[in-house]
Structure formats: C-alpha cells, structure tokens
Amino acid sequence: MRSILLFAAMSLVLPSTALAGFRVSTSKKDSSRQNNWGASSAIDGDMETCWQVDPESEQKGEWIEIDLPASEVDKLQLAVGWNKDKVRFQDYARIKSVRVELYTDDGEKQVLEHKATLEDKMGLQEIDLPNTKVGGEMSGGKVRVIITDFYPGQDYPNLAVSEVLVELKEIDATTTLVSPPPAIEKHGPDSMLDENTRTWWASPASKEDRSFTLEASGFGISSLGILPGPKSMARPKKIAVTVSDNERIFELADSGKLQFFPLPSIVGYTGSAWGEVKVKILETYPSSSSESVGIAEIKLKATNYDGF
C-alpha cells in the first residue's frame, strides 16, 4: 500500500523563491519512526543512506520529486542502488531506467520529458539533460524522476536508492570576504578578489593564520575556485571547506591553474547551499623561497539568485 507523500521544506535555511521540498510516491515503513528510508535519505550526499520503496509496491512507476529554484537544469546524477557496500547493492533492486519530467510554474506546466537507461553498477551515474530553464522571479520548478524498470535484488524485491542530485547550470557569483585573513604587507586579502592574476594574497608564515570566510550574498552557491599564487610562494595543497554546517576536504593539484571544487548540496540540487563559506588551508606545497601561502584569485559560482 502506498504511503502518504513525504515532504520536507527548508524554509528556515533558504530564501523565499528557493524554498525547496522533496517527496516520494512511497517508501518502506520504518518501525523506529525515524524515517530512515524516506526521500531525505536520497538527497543527503551520503552513499550509506538510501530511499527504499515499499516492498509491497510493483516498483515500476514509483518516483522521487525535488523542488527547484528559478534556474537552468543541466544534468541529473543517480546512484541506482544502495551504495553502502557491494553486498547491500546486490541484495536490493536497482534502477535500470527512468523517465525524467521537468515542470515549471509551480508544477503546472511540463517543459521536459527525457528517458534514460542506467548501468547496474555502484557510484553516481550522470544523465545529460537538454538544458531547460524553470521558474521566474516569483516561482521555480520541480523535477520528477520516475522509475520505469529495475534490476532485481538477490534477497529483497524493493528498490533502494542512495542518491539523486539535480545539476543546475552555474553562473558567476559576486564574492566578498566576510572574515579576511592576516596578510603580509602589499599582499592583502583583497588581492584575491581583484580579478588580477598578477596580484596575490600572502599569508604570514604562521600556520595558524591560514583561514578566511567568504560570502556570495543572495546566491545559491555551488562551487569554489582557487587560483594559487606564484611559484615563489607556498601553494595550498589540502583545504577544509565548510558551508551550511557541512565540511568537505579537497586536495589541489600543484598547478598554477584555477581549480574548482563542488560545494555540498543540502536538498537535492547543486547550489542549495547558502550563507558563509569557511576556507581553511590544512597543508601546502612548500616553496624554496617562502613559507607564506599565496592565492591569486578565489571565486564562488552559483546556480540561482534571490537577492531581493
């Protein structure tokens, strides 16, 4: 029997025109009452959790739906089974094919239908969708992923899906420093935001002074870009990035090129992180001439904007 639609809204976190909800057609009942198998477990960025379909369902035709802000949809990523380990992946049914439906104007107008077949393997798989705009100044849209076929599980009949992520097209975000880091004279932190690759921020030699906080007010931020300073300076190697109370560790290549890193998504689409971005340099590529770290440029990218 189908369960009541599950719904979760992040109204205390997101701006008004980016209110994000998510729901599924059905889910496995949870005796612990913690809703471990609901929609939220498929959009939490954790491969060890999963949405499980009700075992009494025929599985085909079940769906997960995610609300989107005004934006442009680009791709969809799916982890077709429970990716906690190989045993659980094989034990439960996995998605074989889907029909992706995209709606705008508060779900009243369908603007895209796209069918795709997926491989029976662990990890995220990407579905390249026709770029499609949704929403306007006062509304967004929604994507519905409908299961049309599945790979049978060895021990259990029901589907278990670890992750669903909608990729939105990125735009440049206006980046500001909320908490500037200490700097060496003539190499202040504003040099990271002046769009001039010939200038750079240089940290004091102390390893305790290598963190700062950024913001892109009004934007739903999706990625962070860092351009290291010249070879005469130490370069960032490993950084900790915290946004919306989620921390990720990234490792940069020892390169003079601009490198981008994805920020956590909190409600099923890229750019669903809002607020301050804290960056801490944990390790560096050393320089023979300086113990100070250099960063020439730092940028934030976003997928949606609500600056009103």
Image (cartoon, helix red, strand yellow):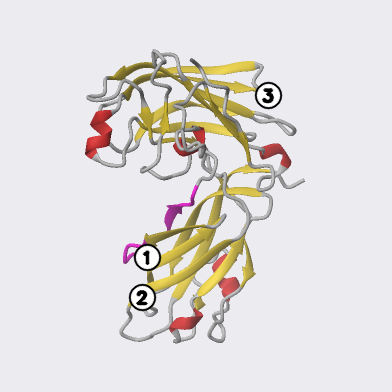
Tag 1: Cα neighbours inside 10 Å, few (<14), some, or many (≥20)? some
The residues bearing labels 3 and 2 have C-alpha atoms spaced at a distance of 51 Å
Q: Which residue is mark 3?
A: 106
The residue shown at (48%, 70%) is 280
> Does the rendering let one see residue 58?
yes
Examine the image and state in which quarter residue 122 appears: top left
Q: Nearer the viewer, mark 3 or mark 1?
A: 3
Q: Earlier in the sequence, mark 3 or mark 1?
A: 3
The secondary structure type at the circle numbered 1 is loop
The residue sitting at 64% across, 49% down in the picture is 219
Dot 3 lies on which element?
Answer: loop
Mark 3 in CB contact with mark 1 (< 8 angstroms): no
Horizontal relation, residue 302 to residue 233: left or right: right
Horizontal side of residue 112 vs 283, given as left or right: right
Please name the residue that numbered disc 1 is placed on: 256
Residue span colored magenta = 251-264
* Mark seen at residue 231: 2
Q: Earlier in the sequence, mark 3 or mark 2?
A: 3
- Give the residue furthest to the right: 308
Q: Amino acid at mark 3?
A: Asp
Question: Do labels 2 and 1 touch, CB within 8 Å?
Answer: yes
* Residue 73 pos. (x, y %): 53, 31
Residue at position x 38%, y 36% in the image:
162
